[in-house]
Amino acid sequence: MDTDKQVVIVGAGPTGLVLAAELARRGVMPRVVDAGAEHVKESRAVAVVARSLELLDDLEIAAATVAQGIPLRALNFYQGTTLVAELDTTAVDSPFPMDLCIAQWQTTDLLRERVRELGVDIEWNTRLVSCEEDETGVSASFAHEDGRLEQCRTSWLVGCDGSHSTVRGAAGIGWETTDLRRGFILGDVTARWNLARDRFHVWFTRDGLVAVFPMPGGYWRILASTPDDRPPRPPEQHHFAASVAERTPLDPRLDDLRWSSAFVAREGLADRFRAGRILLAGDAAHSHSPIGGQGMNTGMQDAYNLGWKLALVASEHAGVSLLDSYGAERRPVAKAVVDATSAATRVATGSTLLARRGRRHALGLLSRLNTVQQRFSNAIGEHLVNYRDSALVSERWSYGRPKAWTNGTATGPQAGEVVADAYLETRSGPVALRHLLRALGHHLILFAADESDPGTLAAWKTEAEQIMAGHGQVLIITRGHLPATPTDGVFADVRSEAHNRYGVRRPSLYLIRPDKYVGHRDDDIDFTPVRHYFRTLRGEFGRSAVSAVVD
């Protein structure tokens, strides 16, 4: 019986690979198995949103991903030949202001290579037969391609094995499902179209919708609804040509159908994301309509949230109860995505006259409101996802009169919100804050604001480093120029960009979690809540452990 690995991941799609990378780079080497074959090139999900690009940037593969994909800047909606709305997708507050079109197999290949660099091998054609959890671990049985059965013992098992998850069924985790009764076909083709290749294009008609968007290599992805919930399987080139001819002004002469699939939109949500030592992530935990392109991205963010927590628990640097925060934080996100995509699917496929008129009016109104466009971009980019209600975050923050050097409006990311990026100065040149946050562990940022006394800064840094020993790094950001004496970990905010973006008006601190969400913030240099935060990680998890200090 194999007992070498503390964590076994079932499923080597994007979710499982992100989880494997997050564990491996923290020194917990997982075993990764997948029932499928290695060389399968299916397009499937094709949109990588801004927040996921930031995740990939943390893994140092965002540049390679962007180089292989096509950045999309807008979403165009048509009725017939009339453009009824153009929604900007670049207004997201991110260093990657785009939706990136790239085939899922390309994203997966980049993640596989990164995982291999970190020392993790993937076992293909290895199917989970059964698993059973007890107080000390999980016993699992695997069937190999040659028919050999293997018994495995592991401390933790994570199901990233899709919407028909074997892990979920074996763990006895409930699955709430709804059939939307909407059929779709999708495929990748070449076509003679004079369309801008920097945006999505969507046509609505009484017969259904057709969406097309550019793919690398000169291809176009076509997504078309079907008149009922029985789409052709597999859809062929003439099915796509007919949809294009009937619902768009585009030339229906298509070539080179390289991949196609059909599905009926169904929703599913696990009633919990953890059953003892068995956890779920990605489609195994939630499944929904592809309208909006959130599925793969939500799964990768599941893994990003779970990875650092499971690594701390597996290495005995945190209490097991920390894993309760995974489901507490991610299941509400998954439910919101399921609800939103369900509503979007019904609106997009509505065929009555009232539905069509309402859709057109709403789209026209949305495209004319800048604030709505910005919110739309941030929603699509998953920048509105937050854990503000989590028991693992806290803040003590008041908003006094802004200093003259602030923009007077920024309040900074709240506890539970994603961090903001900014450029800082070092003696060797500028550096992006997000790149400083690539270092493993937590990050305690001390904003000096108007404080410039070297002795005070040194005292803060000494105490902060004592608290952060074994947990992560300390950064001090001064407003103005660098101190005369070179000091490690001190950076200059010459234009006050970072202070403004974090809403800092007096000496303050931010504790940043490894998944780049704010764990705690305080508009004073008070380290007591930070100490309690780490005591919470090491011991019993609960709202009172952190919040009692600041309430």
Image (cartoon, grey):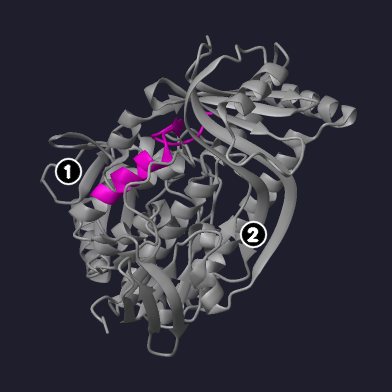
Q: Quadrant of residue 31?
A: bottom left
- Rate crowding at label 1 as few (under 14), some (14 to 19) or many (20 or more) other CA atoms within 10 Å: some
Q: Which residue, given by chain and number where applicable, does mark 1 sit on?
A: 483
Q: Residue 405 location, x and y as percent?
A: 41, 33
Viewer-closest of 427 and 171? 171
- Rate crowding at label 2 as few (under 14), some (14 to 19) or many (20 or more) other CA atoms within 10 Å: many
- Answer with mark 1 or mark 2, whichever residue precedes in sequence: 2
Image quadrant occupied by the N terminus: bottom left
Residue 369 is marked as none
Q: Which residues are magenta?
A: 89-113
Residue 94 magenta-drawn? yes
Q: Residue 172 location, x and y as percent?
A: 58, 78
Q: Quadrant of residue 510?
A: bottom left
Viewer-closest of 510 and 81? 81
Examine the rendering and report whether any part of residue 413 can be seen.
Answer: no
The kind of residue tagged 2 is: Gly
Viewer-closest of 119 and 359? 119
Give the side of residue 360 with respect to residue 217, left or right. right
Report the residue at 45% width, 38% height from top. 43
Helix, strand or loop at mark 2? strand
Report the residue at 40% width, 51% height from top. 14
Give the side of residue 502 with respect to residue 33, left or right. right
Give the side of residue 202 with respect to residue 28, left or right. right
Report the residue at 47% width, 71% height from top. 279
Report the residue at 51% width, 53% height from top. 414
> Vertically, is 16 above or below 453?
below
Q: Which residue, given by chain and number where applicable, does mark 2 sit on?
A: 268
Q: How many marks?
A: 2
Examine the rendering and report whether any part of residue 262 can be seen.
Answer: yes
Residue 540 magenta-drawn? no
